[in-house]
Image (cartoon, rainbow, N blue to C red):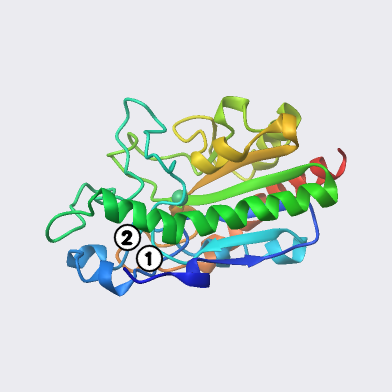
Amino acid sequence: MTTAGARVFRLDRGTRALLMSVPHLGTEIVADVAARLRPHAVTSPDTDFHLDRLYDFAPALGMSRLLAHYSRYVIDLNRPPDDRNLYPGADTTGLVPVDTFAGEPLYRDAPPDAAEVAARRDAYWQPYHAALQEELARLRAAFGTVVLFDCHSIRSHVPRFFEGRLPEFNLGTANGASCDPALRAALRSALTCDGFTLAVDGRFKGGYITRQYGAPGEGVHAFQLELSQVTYMREDASNAFDETLAARVRPPLQRMLEAALQWVEAQ
Ligand SMILES: [Zn+2]
């Protein structure tokens, strides 16, 4: 298998106590994997599209950003390395997915075997998580307390995972376990505005990254926002960014991150 090297992620180090992780941003699929995928999968339709462009204000706020380069079809960076189900009893896609959110098989022939899953974990999953851990450690050493924002988006209708139309904002804090209650309240308040709908620890409670690294007792406060893609892009085959829609949703997103910065800098 082709090795990924330094292209697994891009890390922009900031100057404040907030790290933004975007594990499903990547669309690239290494050639030897792409060659085995069915045609519909090569465009990686389940990507969290355009989140770097949507959150274009993040660098100016001084936060660090960790951006994934490869598609979740290569490996899902927001799944546990042992691939246990984060939502027991509910349908999910795995560490190395074998089907799309729509339930279509990804591979023309046999999906990856255990040895290939392990090789992808070493080549792609480990470097991203090593970088995430190192940046959290750097920020903790500098500031004492740090906020980790795991940034996601998903189509507004995915019948496999939830009924009906998803609320626009889905804040996840592992039912309150991954961050301080005051931070959770500040985030909720920042997102309650402008006519957008909000769920807190509803269908999306935070994935592996939120749950694994959120450790309030150790000074790491994590939350996830699963944003409905209908708020900023076209939910058709074009997956096109919509600047008019994005201009409406950026203000509450920026308020959310400013609230997180304000909270962490008061600790
Ligand atoms: Zn995601």
Image location (x, y in percent) of residue 95: 36, 47
32 with respect to 77 (left or right): left
Asked whether mark 2 lies closer than 8 Å to ligand 1, one says no
**Foreground residue, 229 or 47?**
47
The residues tagged by marks 2 and 1 sit, at their Cα atoms, a distance apart of: 8 Å
Q: Earlier in the sequence, mark 2 or mark 1?
A: 2
Q: Which residue is under mark 1?
A: 239
Q: Residue at 78% of width from left, 47% of height from top?
A: 140
Q: Quadrant of the C terminus?
A: top right
Residue 48 visible in the current orientation? no
Q: Amino acid at mark 2?
A: Pro
Residue that extends furthest to the bottom in the rendered view of this protein: 31
Residue that extends furthest to the right in the rendered view of this protein: 266
Q: Amino acid at mark 1?
A: Asn
Q: Residue at 53% of width from left, 57% of height from top?
A: 128
Q: In which quarter of the view is residue 32 placed? A: bottom left
Q: Residue at 84% of width from left, 48% of height from top?
A: 143
Which structural element holds mark 2? loop
191 above or below 62?
A: above
160 with respect to 177 (left or right): left
Image location (x, y in percent) of residue 134: 67, 54
Q: Which residue is under mark 2?
A: 45
Judge the density around disc 2: few (<14), some (14-19), many (≥20) Cα neighbours within 10 Å.
many
Q: Does the residue at mark 2 contact the one at mark 1 (Cβ under 8 Å)?
A: yes
